[in-house]
Amino acid sequence: MSERVEQDFQQADPTRAARDLVPQLDRIVACLDRIERRQEEHSRAYQELKTMFLERRYAQDPALFLPLLRRPAVIPAARKMEILEEAVAAGRITEEEVDRAAPLDALVEGFHRREDRRVYLAVEISWQGTTKDVGRAVERAAIFARALGAEVIPLVAAKELTAPARRMARARGVWWLQDGRAFAPQEIPEEGPESEEA
């Protein structure tokens, strides 16, 4: 090491050097925070797109419900609203219940696979089903059951169910439809991702 470099090195103030680095480090941390937020936003948007794809798929292909029903038919959104409005007029449900049930992703009618009787499915559709999806399916199925005066089975159609959603579905009697395979509540496997972000 040259004498000049060695002298500069001995005279260097480490405290000052550290202070000079602080603003640079702050800028780097702020930049990383922005990148992380963008990644989270992109991840949420991607999740929403995947869910929209699934919703469209189930709406256009009633055959996907064949594991649960014979002759399944997805009830159009306009008819779904008529059912709710007629039930309000008849005093079977309230306006508040209409507001809670109207966003149901799909109402499907058909015949029970083992018994010759008409039943309905109240379907919440999500790429990754969470406890929110399970709770909505239960609540909306109960409202449509009163509105229709018929049996309405709560169902979550999802590529995956989180572990908390699986536990809740088993406890609350909610079916799971995954890629053409139907799981009765007691048949839902326990293992699944723990994350409940969706």
Image: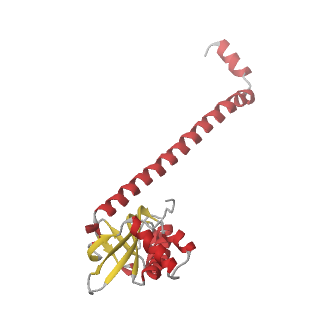
Residue sitting at x 39%, y 69%: 79
Task: Specify whether 66 is left or right of 156.
Answer: left
Task: Specify whether 65 is left or right of 46.
Answer: left
In the figure, 19 relative to 168: above or below? above
Q: Quadrant of residue 36?
A: top right
Locate residue 198, reporting x and y percent: 49, 59
Q: How is the image coloured?
A: secondary structure
Locate residue 124, reporting x and y percent: 42, 67
Closer to us: 44 or 123 = 123
Residue sitting at x 74%, y 30%: 15
Q: Quadrant of the N terminus?
A: top right
In the picture as drawn, the residue positioned furthest to the front comes out as: 89
Residue sitting at x 65%, y 15%: 5
Closer to us: 136 or 94 = 94
Task: Specify whether 40 is left or right of 121.
Answer: right
> Is residue 167 visible from the viewing direction of this image?
no
How many tags in the picture? 0
Closer to us: 76 or 171 = 76
Locate residue 134, reporting x and y percent: 47, 71
Locate residue 190, reporting x and y percent: 41, 73
Residue sitting at x 51%, y 47%: 41
In the figure, 154 relative to 194: above or below? below
Task: Specify whether 31 is left or right of 160.
Answer: right
In the figure, 177 relative to 46: above or below? below
Q: Quadrant of residue 65?
A: bottom left
> Is residue 142 visible from the viewing direction of this image?
yes
